[in-house]
Image (spheres, helix red, strand yellow):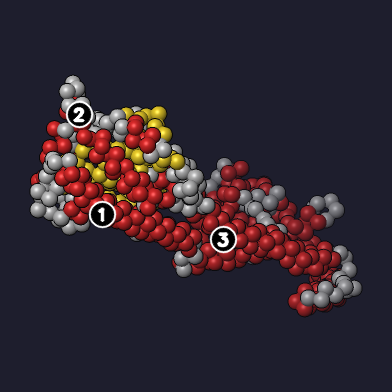
Amino acid sequence: MLREALVLLRRSRGEKTRTLQVRLFAFFAMFAIALVGAGFLILTMTGVFNTAESRHLTWMEAQTGHVQNSVSNDYSKLSLRGVSFARALSSDIQLWVQKNGISEKELSAHPELLESLLSEQAGSLLTVLDNNVCSGAFIMLDATVNPAAENAADKNAGLYFSRTNTNNLSSVSSKTHCLRGPAEIARTNGLELMGQWRMEFDRYSKTLFTKVTGAARQNSDSELSRLYYWSNRFIMDGHSEHVMLLCVPLIARDKTVYGMCGMEVSDMLFKRLYSPDSHEYPRIFSAFAPADGDTLDTGKGLIAGNSYLTSQTIGLLAKETRHGDALTKWRSDPGAIYIGLTQAVRLYPSGSPYEHEPWSLSILMPVSDWDNQVNQSNFSFYGVLTALLAVSLLAAMFISRRYIRPVVSALELIKSDSRSALPKTQITEIDDFLEYLAGLDEERKSLSVELERVKTAGQEQLSSATTAPFEQFLKRLDTLTTTERAVFNLYMEDDSAQQIADKLFVTINTIKFHNKNIYGKLGVSSLKELKVYVNMIKGTPDGG
């Protein structure tokens, strides 16, 4: 049934033929496609197409590890040096208060002495700036130079020196300015006042001061090396640049917490030190920010990358999906998707009141950049396979045309009248076939001559053998009745028995009855023999 269905389907579609060359080209083309497809499958199964992604992932891991190690080491060094700075500063201030006959607790009660105290410590701040990879250094005291002012509770006396041009690798060309502190101290040390200069600290600085000194008071038995704190990214009042501050409390021998000191890491410095290699990915950037489970808050950290301004942040990023085994996708509030690697950075030691505030270093880029680079790396493989397929198809066309040419020529020659003198095609099968056809032609000619001779002889014998019975048959026609003659005449018109019955309006049995009578009167034994004589009558010149 299936075969019959296929035959019917073919007939319904019509007879569609294909030339031998087209069929041969299709065979070679399918063979080439199968080979290229098998090659593609093998490359896919062996992970060749994943090599590009693996290479980029290895590069990303190396970048992340390098930047993470740099950030971790540098921040650890700054933390330790900040603690050392706080200890040295506390010793110097202790000597100063003893010389002036007061204690650290009484600093807020002697605003007239604060400028003298700060003036003696200005050199220490400049030394810290020169000897550390930082963009600023500061001292904040739990006191104000004007306690009678209306907002004195929000003010803190102190010094804040900031270094500009921190994007330059050399500190020689950088310039140090005074951002906070008495103007006379700045002039004495040859420092210019920044346009955002203020006499004292206020606003966010006060909030930060309260957090650090409050934690130090609550953990009075802790070592100073466990009490330092790194602030979130913020911009100081009147300043134009975002910074992170290392804050270390100033603690007297009697456990009195009377201020804090520390160092600054600005956006520009962070960018100079921790920007990832952007040769392959122009929009790649590093983000050092608080990490809380599935969120990464770059608005509280620092970002470094050639295509991002130092003041720019992505904001809060939410973990979306994991990409493969290592990369993570993050979605920002505006809907942009970033992809990259994230590694934890431990800022605080065990026992620190801030040890549960996790930070991480991430190397991120727009997900489209990653996909484009990986796909571009695979284009070479796709190009080679495509070129191989194109060359294979051209070769299939050339080979099929060249191979089929002698076959087509031979077929054209076969159509000619004479096949005995056909040229050799140099193809064994075709040459044998041509010789076979030539032999058949010779046999056909011989048989034709013999058949003609036999036919002529037979006709002569038949004519002599059938002349007498035929004459008798003609004479017996006169013995037929009118009805029988009508039946015979219809046989002469090549009608069948059923057709005769229909024309004479009788049954088939009646016709059979008449046939029996006709056979007996004419001397024939069957309808077949009767039709022999009928044909002989038709062959006579007068038709009987």
Task: Answer whether residue 101 is visible to the viewer in this image.
Answer: yes
Q: Is 318 in front, or is 430?
A: 318
C-alpha span from label 2 to label 3:
66 Å
Query: Where residue 542 appears, x then y in whole percent?
Result: 84, 51
Labelled pair 2, 3 in contact (Cβ < 8 Å): no
Q: Amino acid at mark 1?
A: Ser
Query: Where residue 263 appears, x then y in whole percent?
Result: 31, 46
Q: Quadrant of residue 475?
A: bottom right
Residue 473 is left or right of residue 244, and the answer is right
**Vertically, is 274 above or below 205?**
below
Q: Earlier in the sequence, mark 2 or mark 3?
A: 2
Q: Is 271 in front, or is 369?
A: 271
**Labelled disc at residue 381:** 3
Q: Earlier in the sequence, mark 1 or mark 3?
A: 1
C-alpha span from label 2 to label 1:
28 Å
- Give the mark toward the camera: 1 or 3: 1
Q: Earlier in the sequence, mark 2 or mark 1?
A: 1
Q: Amino acid at mark 3?
A: Phe
Q: Is 74 in front, or is 322?
A: 74
> Could you say whether the residue bearing mark 3 is in a helix, strand or loop?
helix
Q: Residue at x 53, y 57 (%)?
A: 378
Q: Residue at x 10, y 48 (%)?
A: 255
Q: Which residue is mark 2?
A: 154
Q: Residue at x 77, y 59 (%)?
A: 536
Q: Which residue is mark 1?
A: 84
